[in-house]
Image (cartoon, helix red, strand yellow):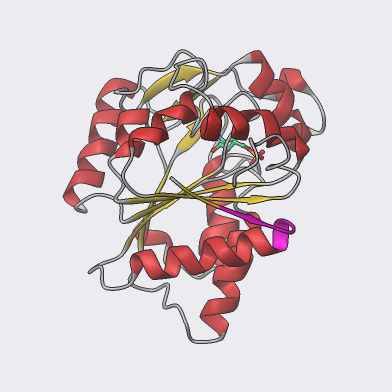
Amino acid sequence: MELLVVKDENEVGRAAADAVIEGLSGAEPPVLGVATGSSPLSTYRHLAEAVKEGRFDPRPVRAFALDEYRGISPEHPESYHAVIRREVCERVGLLPEHVRVPPGRAKDPVSACAEYEAAMAAASGVDVQILGIGSNGHIGFNEPGSSPTSRTRVQRLAPQTRRDNARFFGGRVEDVPEECVTQGIGTILEARRIVLVAQGESKAAALAALVDGPVTVDCPATALQGHPSVLIVADEAAASRLTPRG
Ligand code: GLP
């Protein structure tokens, strides 16, 4: 894994956007894995800048989102369907018909998840996957205990994740859905290139476990240690607990 430590959130976004553009170049069509949460927002801002500057064409890009809550409507402003529509389609300019989000409302989630995986495979997989990391080390919504070979499926959210995400729901933990659909760790690991972004002190422990710790299901992100092409872009606060490198 390659680690890049930069000053602040804006610089994380700049470096990650450049890595995304580079990783997608030459792919036909380019397939981007998109993440939600606050971490990738500066990356999307810089991708939007690159579009304005003529350095990135979003129109041919196909995209697959990592996860979605269960039990809220796609019209809910904090559903990941809505977040992806705002931040990826409206801001960056990807075409809505090229962007898929996991099926949070499916009546038959098992076949809907299999269909999502089949759509990813039919697109020849993901060229670059943007990832955040949860304060408990989750990627997508793969909570501690998730198998490194897991596929797209329904998961229960960890109490820590519901507390962390209450800020998107007016501070009310009880309004954060209890379940989600998430790509599995095995699904995520099939991306050809992974760009993980982390900002702020609240991510420092999870990042230290990812970079310096052993591979363990207690910190799902550590499964990335076995991937051949991972770039971690962190700001100084998120990198503050890493073992100093010579
Ligand atoms: C969220 C998402 C993840 C995200 C992580 C961190 O709940 N499901 O994809 O990477 O948790 O969120 P944030 O970037 O807001 O800290």
Relative placement, left or right, of 35 versus 203 is left
Q: What residue is shown at x 25% (from left), y 25% (from top)? A: 111
Tell me if residue 189 can be seen: yes
Tell me if residue 184 can be seen: no
Whether the magenta-drawn stretch holds residue 204 is answered as no
Q: Which image quarter has ligand 1?
A: top right
Question: Splitting the image into 4 quarters, where does residue 46 fall?
Answer: bottom right
Question: Splitting the image into 4 quarters, where does residue 30 fall?
Answer: bottom left
Q: Looking at the image, which is closer to me, 31 or 191?
A: 191
Determine the residue located farthest toward the front in the rendered image. Answer: 246
Whether the magenta-drawn stretch holds residue 8 is answered as yes
Q: Position of residue 117 (x, y in %)?
A: 25, 37
Q: Which residues are magenta?
A: 4-10
Total number of numbered discs in the rendering: 0
Q: Position of residue 106 (x, y in %)?
A: 38, 28
Where is the N terminus found, in terms of image quarters? Answer: top left
